[in-house]
Each structure stands twice: as C-alpha cells, then as structure tokens.
Amino acid sequence: MEATAPPLSRKAQIDQTATALFRTRGFAATSMRELAEALGLEAGSLYSHIKSKQELLHRICFRLADDFFAGFAAATQAADESAATQLRYAIESHVWVLTQDVAASAVFLHEWRHLSEPARTEFLALRERYEVGFRLLIQRGVEQNDLRTPDAAFATLTLLASLNWLPTWYKPEGKMPPSDIAHRLAEQLLSGLRV
Amino acid sequence: MEATAPPLSRKAQIDQTATALFRTRGFAATSMRELAEALGLEAGSLYSHIKSKQELLHRICFRLADDFFAGFAAATQAADESAATQLRYAIESHVWVLTQDVAASAVFLHEWRHLSEPARTEFLALRERYEVGFRLLIQRGVEQNDLRTPDAAFATLTLLASLNWLPTWYKPEGKMPPSDIAHRLAEQLLSGLRV
DNA sequence: TAAGGTTCCTAACGTTCGTTAGCAAGCCTG
DNA sequence: CAGGCTTGCTAACGAACGTTAGGAACCTTA
C-alpha cells in the first residue's frame, strides 16, 4: 500500500482530465478549450505538453490495450490449468482492468472510432486478436467437456459484451469490490440463469 | 411480403442517411455538410425539411424507444405464461427490434448522450423504465423457481449488455436470420456455458 | 550566475461549424 | 391558370474549432 500517491506530472494530469471529458462528452464533442478550462489553463498552453488532441486519444486507447493483453497473458500462462479455469481467470483479469480505470475503459470501448489512420486499423487488429484469445479458450473448454455452447464465436461475443457493459454502470465508490464483481460476473456467465 | 417498398419521403431519406452517418462517424463528428453531400444536396437545403440537427437525433432515439416498449408490451401481455417464458419472448422482441434497424439501434445505444436537455433526461427515464421491466421478469422467474441468480439487478444488466452488443457485429446480409439469433441468444443467456 | 527545461500566457491563424435569409423552379390541386 | 406546397439553390452570419508563434516567468542544475 502506498502512503501517498506520487504527484502526477502535468502531462499525466492532462491525460486524466481528458479521459474523464472524453468519457462523458465524447471525443468529438470535447474541445481543447473545455479541457484547458478543466485544468485551469488556457487552450494554447496545452500544446506545451502534448502534440495534438489525437495524441491524447491514442495514448488512452493503446495504454488500455496493453493492460488488457498483459492481464490476459498472466491469466493464461498456467499451462496445467484447464481451459475453463483459464477462462475464469481471463474474465476476472478483464474485469480488473475495467474497474481499475473506468473512465479510460469507457473511452477505450466507445471512442476508438475517432482514432485517425493508421492507428484506427492497428487498434482494431489488437481488439480482434484479444477476442481470438477468448474464443480459443472457450473452444478448448468445449473440447475438454468443461464448457457447452453451440457456437464458440457467438458465445465469445456475448461474453465480452456482458463484461464491456460494466463501465456504463460501475461506480468505484460502490459497495461491491472489483474482485466480487469479477467473481459474480464469471459465475453468471459460466452458469447462466436457468435452474 | 410487400412487392415494392413505398418511396421514402425526403424527410425519411434524411433520417435514414443521418442514422447511418451518426452510427459510423458519431453524432458530434457528423457535419450537416457531410449529411447533405451524402444526400446530394447543399447544406442549407436540409433546413427545408428539418428544424435542426438535434431534431434528427431526437427522432431517431425516441422512435426506437417506442419500438422497444411496444415489443416488450406484446411479449409480456400473455398473463398465463410463466415469467421465464415471458422473459424469453422479451429477449426475442428486443433482438427483433435491434436487427430490424441496426444503424438506428447503434445510434440509440451510443449517441443518446448528445441529446440536449430535457430530451436527454427524458430518454434516460425511459431506458430505466425498460430495464425495470426486464428486472421484474427475472425476479418473478426466480420466485417461480424457473430462474436462478444471486442478484436480479446484476443479471438484468449483463443480459441487456449481451443483447445490446449485437449491433456492433450483426450484419443483415449474414447467414443467420434474426429469429435464429434471437433464439440462440435467449438460449445461451438463460442456460449459460457450463455443462 | 548562466543554461536549459518546464510551464503558461496572449493573440491570432485559417477552417469548419450549425443555421438563416431570400429566391426560384417544379409540382399537385382547385 | 392561379395558389400553395415541396424542394433546392447561393450566400452569408457569428461562433467555435484545433493549432501555432512568440514571449515571459519560474525552477533546477552546472
């Protein structure tokens, strides 16, 4: 546990404020003047720290992509675990990353379309690769008779959909800690509703 | 089956094109000049048919809200059905509305935040009311021992999340007809993945 | 004390934005 | 054929946009 968080660099403060604004207002509807005012600056001053508005979005999106991949790699590195168990770990890791920075997650999930090329194409390729990781886990789980689904690709999409809706309702100050949320989500998605 | 669709009024054409642009570009990032060009018009000409850009978004969002409520009402009117069965019908209705106009659905789900007040607040109230409808079905299903979940509110959110992700990947020209998608989604969400 | 980096300012640039005004051609209805 | 509705144009409005230039404080390090 850290006693006090180290003071954020000015650049990090800008990233953080931009993330919050991009989340609530959307990237296109957030002006640099709004962002500057939220930081107590004039608009032009921002450009002593950043190169462009686009750079802000790029950093937010790709930093989170890194986090998701790192978490997935850690969740699936234990080769002696069953695919179903690895899937549970991957789900919990995904939820963990989402809850660690809900604002950045929301931007990651909804504002990537405003990335300019070639970043946008690169981003989509990363997302596709991440989804494939989940799909392979589900397929292996089916082969090992631990999971059951008529269509692994279909199941993957709905599973990630359920997880990715979380930033729209999750409040960090809520009663349920992220670990509980992760566990409950994994349980429900793996077990369904039916008796 | 209709032999030929009636020609769309100019206003309806504008709505349709605006929906497609709002979906792919986002509301804020779509200019009236872009919209006009997609229709083969000059920007000023649009205002012979509509009052404002905001009006376009308003009509798209609230028309779809009407469709969702109408479908839900039809799905749950048979009082002799169990809650679990009504839930299945409601899921299938939801998927049906989504697939009938994927572009409008995507706008409905992602661009409502750009509604100006008081429309935005009104919209959120409608969405809340809709979610309550689903939550009550799940709760009744649990009471009737047809469904099982530790937290009905939680289950409702993940269920709608799975459904609402559909417009991001559904292609109308795909092989799977909407009725199959609806059935499969309902099956998976009610049964889960586990053997 | 000198040098260099960090931080922020004012002022302005060219562009694009949503929207309006005024006008005109074509159409259906009487 | 007259009236009005639909449809579309050109031209322009004030405002807001992202970004840049040039300068001035301040802090740290040599």
Image (cartoon, coloured by chain):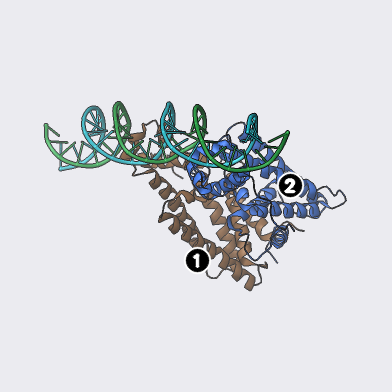
Chain colours: A brown, B blue, C green, D cyan
Type of residue at label 2? Phe
**Residue at position x 51%, y 44% in the image:** B41
Compared to B137, does B189 lie above or below?
below
Q: Position of residue B105 (x, y in %)?
A: 63, 49
Residue at screen point 69% across, 56% down: B4
Horizontally, is D7 left or right of B156 in the view?
Answer: left
Numbered tag placed on residue B169 in the rendering: none
Crowding near the residue tagged with mark 2, few <14, some 14–19, many ≥20 C-alpha atoms within 10 Å: many
- Is A168 above or below relative to A74? above
Q: Position of residue D19 (x, y in %)?
A: 33, 41
- Residue A129 picture location, percent across and down: 49, 63
Instruction: Write down the residue under mark 1.
Output: A77
Q: Which amino acid does label 1 sit on?
A: Gln
User: What is the chain identity of the residue bearing mark 1?
Assistant: A
Quickly name the residue at label 2: B134
Query: Helix, strand or loop at disc 1?
Result: loop
Q: Between residue B66 and residue B4, name the one nearer to us.
A: B4
